[in-house]
Amino acid sequence: MNQMNIYMADLVHNRFMGSSANDTVPYNVASISAYTKSLFNKNTQIKIFKYTDDLIEAVKENPPNIIAFSHYIWNAHLNQSIGNYLKEKYPELLIVAGGPSIKTTHNEIKEFLEVNKYIDLCVINEGEGAFLNCVIAYDQGAKSFMDKKQIIPNVGYLSGGSLIFEVENKFSDLDNIPSPYLLGYLDEFLEQGLMPIFETNRGCPFKCTYCAWGKAALSKVRKMSLPKVLKEMEYVAEKYPQCADWIIGDANFGMLPRDIEIAHKINELRKNRPSIKSVTVYESKNTTIRSIEISSILRKSGDIKKQQDFSLIALQTLDETAQKYSKRSNIKLDDVPLKIKAFRDAGTGVRTDILSGLPGESFEGHMSTLRQCFDYGFDHIGIYNVIILPGTEMETQESRNNYAIKTKFRLKDNAFGQYNDIKSIEQEEVICSNNAITEAELLTLRCMHWHIWFGWNHGFFKPFFKYVYKNHGLNPVDIIYKVATSANLKNNLKTSLDCFKENFEGEFFESPESLREYYFNPSVWSKILNKGLSRAGFILNAKFIQDKELYKSALEALTNVVSTNKVEKDKLKILSNLLLQKRIWPDDIFNANFKQKISLKLTQNIAEFFNIKNSNNIFILNKSLSEQKTIRDRLKKHSYEVRPRMAIINTLLSIPDAFEMKFSQEKVVHQREELIYT
Ligand code: SF4
């Protein structure tokens, strides 16, 4: 063979950007490429692909010897569809697949290969060493090793209907993996501004049952060489300062003492490069003091106002039974208040992630978890459904039986597309009930979660909730519960919430097949291809952002469930009026200048609450010209005139406070002014 051509594909559905899979560089396959290239000494050309159309074109122009697909929930069906297409056209191709979704037992691997017939070889666990072995075997005579039933460690394949597979519990020495950044493998993706992912260590000692890192084989934490990590960061910062957001991909950044040095390096690199706006880290559990120190180092540079840059304490649940069943009992939680305080002292917001539907967590257990999150004072409470990930302990039949887990399937957000007439859709399997919670209870919770996302995380009701918590001692969870279950809502609000529940339920299907049958129907398919598709919660966000009367009704409902007497009700009405006046209605952004004086009679404690002082009840609300421009550009980019809701949804995802003004610090010169909004 003169030259071996290898294509490495980490494909995404690239119709819409905005998900972390779509927006990050394909580090995983680049690392495997760098390792292969360094140890396979023959003439080899390796190309990396992220976009499906590019891969198809490249194969047509110059069919490679080997294609390797990285396999995860955002591209499993895409890989299958493209893999089948390529295999039919180019039967000589050797197709390899690997990734966290690939299961590890004999039976599971066999079943996987029987279903995914396009795959010749399936790489188990870590990719670098096993893929190199595939390349070496291929070099010795194309696919002849398969006829000979030759064993390739950590690689499975079918031969005459039997699985040939042997596991070898030996991982590559991470020091032997050259940097894909320094070799230039990721340059073309960094040039596009995609997010760089840095891997400073690999593995996680915890065993959460719903997580792919929880597998026993991946529990040992191994370090990348420190000089390599620091050089990679220097390389990206110096050559690609346009990459605004960085990710440290480690499961527990801060676990190792040297992580302090890495944080200092990031700080040093960001100091003179304001274009590097945020660095996401997944903080280490059980190493509180170091996590706090790292957070404080990282806050010294960069834009700490960005939500993504909030310090994350991923609680998932505070329910003891759920912690036990998901094997998280060994993660210490008693120092959460200390961490939050320290993060705040370092000048940053703090966010948490919570899961809904975990085995063992009842309706009341989940409510307590949420209440506690508000008591802790998290600035952002991200609540997600439990998704059953392939290859995790939770996915096993034993776990499903133990906890009576019932699931349904829904289209993975924005993960669909058509390539060369090949239609593809990704699904996610979501827990809809278990032996601790019913489907109806989870539906009520979804409605409550929406209020938290819209009202707290995006901030549209946040001052109201904070005021009531401080002055009435009422936890937002209890206020939201009353609204979500109230029979006395105004018609427009009731209709919108009912419609949300209906849309939400309509997203779920009994099986992946029924999901595809529905979306592949030509009329549905052309609609979602042309107009896009969004989740029920995002659609409801957009409605409340567009519709002033609806927003008013929601504020009124909150006021009604809180107020016990007329005096307090009047105060809450003033507060609601203020929130209403702070709002920007999307149509206005194209023709208004948002520097407005408003006249509003605030009670002293409301004024104090907002930290605003003004004896004349005249205030300035402002949205800077540059912010206005950014929002207008974003709305236009997402075709506001044609698809206003989708444009609002996408704008809000990247600019959470896009549709609100802030109090200006400027002095009010004139004493009297017209009300701008009435
Ligand atoms: S959820 Fe986090 S702590 Fe748990 S296994 Fe996964 S990476 Fe480790």
Image: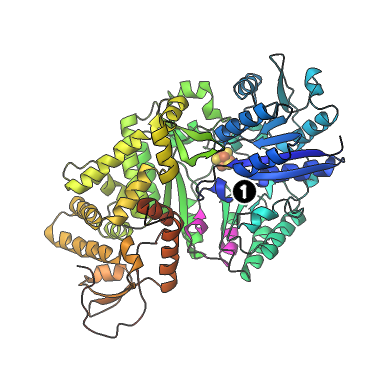
Report whether 157 appears left or right of 417: right
Quadrant of the rendered image containing residue 85: top right
Span colored in magenta? 293-313
Q: Which residue lies furthest to the left in this view?
A: 566
Tell me where residue 607 appears, x and y as whole percent: 27, 71
Tell me where residue 458 appears, x and y as whole percent: 38, 56
Query: Image height check: is 71 above or below 309?
Result: above
**Quarter of the displayed picture in which ligand 1 can be seen:** top right
- Specify few, some or many for label 1: CA neighbours under 10 Å numbering under 14, 14-19, or 20 or more: some
Quadrant of the rendered image containing residue 528: top left
Would you say residue 131 is visible in this rendering?
yes
Query: Image height check: is 193 above or below 121?
Result: below
Report whether 3 appears left or right of 420: right
Q: Which amino acid does label 1 sit on?
A: Gly
Q: Which residue lies furthest to the bottom in this view?
A: 669
Name the foreground residue: 610 vs 75.
Answer: 75
Q: What element carries label 1?
A: strand
Tell me where residue 611 appears, x and y as whole percent: 33, 71
Name the foreground residue: 212 vs 595.
Answer: 595
Instruction: Give the residue number, with chain letter if any, for mark 1.
Output: 249
Tell me where residue 102 appears, x and y as whole percent: 62, 30
- Quadrant for the N terminus in the image: top right
